[in-house]
Amino acid sequence: MQRKLISGIAGILIALFIGAIIMIAQGFNPLTTYGALFNYSLIGLFPLATTLRNSVPLILTGLSASVAFASGPVNLGQPGQLLMGALFATIGGLYLDLPPVLMIPLLLLLAMIGGAMWSGLAALMRRWFNMDEFITTLMLNMIADFLTYWAISYPIFDKTAFSPMTPQISTNGWLPVIGEFNTNVIVMLVAFGVIYFVFSRWTAGYEWRITGQNSIFARLGGCKIDKNYVTVMLVTGALAGLAGGLVVMAGPHRFLKGLGANYAWDGVMIAVVANNGLIGTLLYGLFFSSLQTGALGMELITAVPSEFIQVLQAVIVLVVVAGRGTLDILINKTISRRKAREHAT
Amino acid sequence: MTKPIIEMKNIIKVFPPNVVALDSVSADFMQGEIHAIVGENGAGKSTLMKVLYGLEHANSGEIFFQEVKIENKNAGEAIARGIGMVHQEILLIPEYTVWENIILGEEPTGLFGKIDQHAAREQVKSRIDEFQFNLDPDSKVEDISVAARQKVEILKLLYRNVSVLILDEPTAVLTPQEIPQLFLELRRLAKNGKTILFISHHLEEVLELSDRITVMRKGAKIATVDAANTSKDSLAQMMVGREVLFSSQRIEQIPGEVVFNTENLSFRDANLRIRLENVSLSVRAGEIVGIAGVEGNGQLELVNCMMGMSKPFQGKIVVNNCDLTHAEILERRRFISFVSQDRSKMGASIKDSILDNVRMTHHRLNPKFTHWKGLLLNDVYARKFTAQIEKAFAVVMGSADNEFRSLSGGNQQKVILGRELLLDTPFILLDQPTRGLDVGSIEYVHETILKMRGQNRAILLISADLEELFRIADRILVIFRGKIVADLPVAQTNIEQIGYLMLEGREKINAAKTD
Amino acid sequence: MNILTGLINGMISGATPILLAALGGTFTYYAGIFNIAMEGMMLSGAFFAVLGSYYFNSWPMGILCAILGSLFMALIFILFAVKLKTDEFVTGIALNLFAVGSTTYLLRQIFDVKGAFSKPGIVPIPRLNIPLINKIPFLGDILSGQNMIIYLTILLTILAAYMIFKTRFGLRLRAAGYNAACLDSSGVSTDRVRTWSLILCGVFCGLAGAFLSLGYVTLFSENMSAGRGWISLAAVILVNGNPWGIALISLIFGFTDGFGLLLQQYLPSQFTSMVPYVATLIALYFYSVKARNKKA
C-alpha cells in the first residue's frame, strides 16, 4: 500500500516535471501555469465544487473499467455505454414527469439499464458466438456514437436549436444543488460504496477477483465463470451508463452533441493508472478531474492552451505505470546487490 | 582431460529481492569430459549453468574459458565462444521445421536477407549424417517425438560448432528405454573432443555416464568427485545432507468398495484426433491407483474430462454411484478433491492472498464460509480454517493476508493439499503432486497421501515419476496414446516393465531381440 | 458504369489506410507484441503529414514528417513496452491518449485552430496517371490515376509478405512471437527483433496517416483516424496476421466504406457511417464461430 502511494506520487511529480520541461521549451512559465491550474480547480469553494462535479463521470467510468479489468472482461466500451445511459436518461426525462423523489431514481435506473444493455450486447456476443469483447465493445462505441448522434438529430431533436441536441429534460429530473455542490457526487459515492462492498466482501465479488487473476483456477474451484462474466459486463456497463445519466441530469440537462467525447477514454485511462484498484480509481479520478477542471482557468491566465492537459494526462499515465514496475525492479535489485556483497565478504 | 576448458570462480547470484541462488560457487570443467552436476531441486544447478551460458548474470565472480576471462552478456555471446545449452523444457518452435529450428539465429542468406533454403537444408543434413542422428530435416517439430526434439536441440548447437554442451536434465523427458541412446550419442560427442556438462538428479544415470561429478546443495558446491570413486549412497548423502528414505512404510490394507470409475471414456480434440479411447478404470476406497505414462499420452485430457474442463464424446464418469459425466464443475467438487500438476496455473491464484486461495471451493460447498445464504464472505471462519491448515499440514506462513506466491513451493503445495483434502471428498485426484518439490516436501506429500489411504479415501495418482508410483501406489495403470494398456498390481511388476509399456504400449515380447 | 468505378475507387481508397496500418500491425503481431497503438501512430502521422506538407510546401516532406511523427510514437512504445517492460496494453492505451492529446494541442498551438486545419497551402500527394493504361476503358479508370500511396501500398504488401515468410528477419520475427525464450537462446535478442518490428509498424502507420490527411482528404481534423487503427487491429487478428488476408479484408472494409456512402441516398448519414464498424462485428462473428467450431 505504502509502496503504491510512493510510486504514484513520485510518478505524478515526474510527469509534472516533464510537463514543465515541455512548457519551458515552448516559452511558458511552468510555475504560473501549474499555479493557475490548481488555483482554478482546488482553491475555493466554487472550483472545488466544480472539480467534484466533474470527477463523477471520470470516477464512475474508471470504476467500470477497473472492476471489469480486475475481474477479467476487457470491457473497453465505457464511452458507448455512457452515451447509451445518457440517451436513456434523456428519453426518460423528456417523456416522463413524476415528482423528483420518484423521477430521479427512475432516471438513474434508466441510465444504468441503457449502459447495461449496451455492455450486455457485447456479453451476449461473447457468450453465444465467442466474439472477443475487446473488439466488440470498441466497435459498439463507434456505433453508439452514431446512433445517439442520429437520435438527437432526428427523433428527439430540439427544433429550436441550431446544432444537434435534445430539448431539456423535465426539471423534476434535475439533480438538486446544495450551495455550490451538485448532488451527483452523492450518487457517485453511493455507487462507489456499493461496488466496493460487493467487490471486496461478497462471495460474488470474491469470485470476480479470483477469476480476474486466474480464471482456470477459479473455474476448477467451482466458480461459475460464464455467469460471472455476464454479471460483470452488466454491472460495469450499468456503472458507465450511470455516469452518462448523471452527466445529463447534473449538467446541461439535455443530450448535446459530443456529450461523451470528453470522457471517451478517461475511464480506461484512470483504471490503468490505478492498476484496477478501486480506491486508486477514486483518487486518480479526483486528481484528473482537478487537471481537467483547472485547464480552462489555466488557459485564461496563461497562454497555455487547455489541450495541454490532454498531453499531461497521457504523460502521467505512462510515467506512473512504467514507474510502478520499474520501482519494484529497482528496489529488488538494490536488495539483491546488497545481499550479494554480504556473501562475497 | 588435461587442462580445464572452463573455470568458474566464486560465482554469486542473488535473485531479486533476496534469494541466494549461488553462494560463491567455484567449479572447473575439463576438455572432453562428461561432467555431471547433481543436486536437489533448487540447489542451483541450472542457475550455475545459466550464468555460464549468459542467460543469468552473476552478481560477482569470474569465468575463464580456455584461460581467458570471459563474461557472456547473452546466449549469443556464449554460442559465439562455443558454449551451448539444451534446456530442460525444450526450447524449440513447434511450428517450424527441423532445419528452420536448427538454423534460427545463424541463417545462411542470399540477396536481400533471403534465406538460402537449399544451403540451409544441405548443411543441416550433413550434420545429421555426421553425428548419426536419425532425423528428417523437413518434418515439423510439433510432429516429432520428445526424444527427437532433444536431438534437434543438440544438433542446433553442433551446427553452431560449440565445443561445450550443457544439458539441463536431458533424461527427465525421456522414457527409460530412450536414455541409453542419448548416452551413446553423448559419449560419442565426448570422444570427439566436446565437453559435456550434464545436470541431473538421477544418481544412477549420473554414475553410469559421467567422468566427474559436482554435487551442489542449497546454492553451494559440496564437492567434485570422480565417478569411479564414489557411490550412490555417498552422493545422495552429499546432496541432501542427511539420510534419505528411499521407501516409505506402507501398511498392507484391503481396499473396499469401488468409489470412482470411468466407463469407456473417450475424448476427441479440436482436430477430431482421438486423445482418449475407451478408458475404463476404477478406484476402490483405501486404494492408491497410479497412472504411469510418458507426458502427452492423454493424462491431461483424462484430468480435464474428470474435472469437467473438457467434454468426453462418449463414456461415463461415476463417483459413489453418482453419474458425473455431464455435471457442472461445482457438483463434481462435492465428490472430487483435485491437486493439479501446475500450482500457479491451476492450483492457486498466486497474486491473491493465502486466505483467498484457501477458501476456494469451500466458499460454495461449506455454508460456514459465508453469511446471508451465501451472499457475504465469512472472513472469521476462513481465517480459522487457514490456521487449521497451517497447523495440520505444518505450513510455514506469515500472515494469511500475504500473497500466495510469498510461500515456498513446498508450502504452497501443502496449502493446496490442505484445501483439497479438507473438502472431505470420497475421491482424490492427484496430478503429479510432487512435481518441482524438494525431497523433504515430497516425503511429506507421500506421507499425507498414504494417510488419506488409511482413511479409506479412493486415490488416483497420475505421475511421470516411476519411483514415486512404486513407492506409494497399490496398482499401476499405464496410459499410452490415450489408451490404458496395462493394469498391474505393484507387487507383480517392476520399473523396467512399466517403462517398456509406457514407451511401446505393449509388453516386451522377447528381451533378447529388443536389446 | 460510373457508379461501379466510383464504388471500386471508393473501396480502394477506403481500404488503403486500414491496409497500411494493418501491415504495420502484422509485424508486431508476428513479433508477439500486443500492439494497440496503431490508432495513435496513424493519427500522429496524419498530423505531421499536414504539418510537413504545409511548411515545406511539398508532399514528399509531408510523407517524411508523417513517418517521423509516427516513428516518434513507436519509439515511445519501444521505450516503455520493450525497454521498461511496461504492460503492452497499458502502453498502447496511454500512447493513443497521448496521440489524441498532443495532436489536438499542437493543432491549437501551431495552427491556432480548434477542430480541423485546412488551407490551400497543404500540398496533397498527387495521383499517378499511367500512360496507355489510362486509355483502357473502365479498367483504366481504376488501374490508373490513383493516389501514389495506393501504388506504394501494393508494393509494400508484397514486400511485407516477402519479409515475413522468406527472409532471415522474418524467420526471427515469427520466432519472437512463437517462442521468445527460444529465440533468445538461439543467440538473437528478442528485444531487438521486437524493436525493429515496432519501427516498421511506425513507418507503415505513418504512411497510413499521410494517406488520410494528404490523400483521402487534404486537411487534418481532431481524432481523424476515427477508429481505423482499431479496425486494422481487428483485420490482423481475423486473418492471423497473413498479409494477403489482410489485403483482402481491408478491401472488404473499404467496400463497406464506399457502400455506406452509396447508402446515404436512402439512409441518414449516421447510419451509413456505422457500416464499417458493423462490418467488423460481422467479420468477427464469422471468425469467432469458425474458431469455436474448430475447437469443439
Image (cartoon, grey):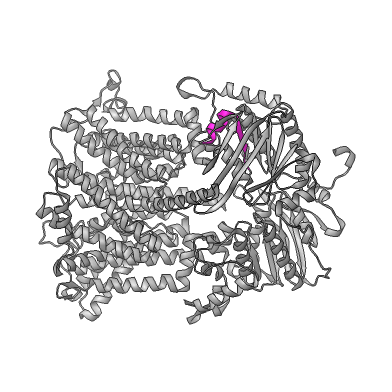
Question: A67 above or below B182?
Answer: below
- Magenta range is B74-87
Q: Which residue lies furthest to the top in this view?
A: C132
Q: Does the magenta stretch include residue B79?
A: yes
Question: B392 above or below B141?
Answer: below
Q: Nearer the viewer, residue B373 or A38?
A: A38
Left or right relative to B475: residue A198 = left
Question: B248 above or below C123?
Answer: below
Q: Which residue lies furthest to the front in this view?
A: A345
Q: Which of A12 and C5 is in front in this view?
A: A12
Q: How many labels does the image show?
A: 0
> Which residue lies at the image location 75% right of the left edge and 36% below the top edge?
B211
Left or right relative to B286: residue C267 = left
Residue B347 percent coordinates (x, y): 58, 61
Residue B239 percent coordinates (x, y): 71, 51
Residue A238 percent coordinates (x, y): 34, 67
> Which residue lies at the image location 30% right of the left edge and 27% below the top edge?
C138
Camera sees residue A240: no
Left or right relative to C237: residue A345 = right
Residue C119, by quadrant, is top left
Location of the N terminus of chain B by quadrant is top right
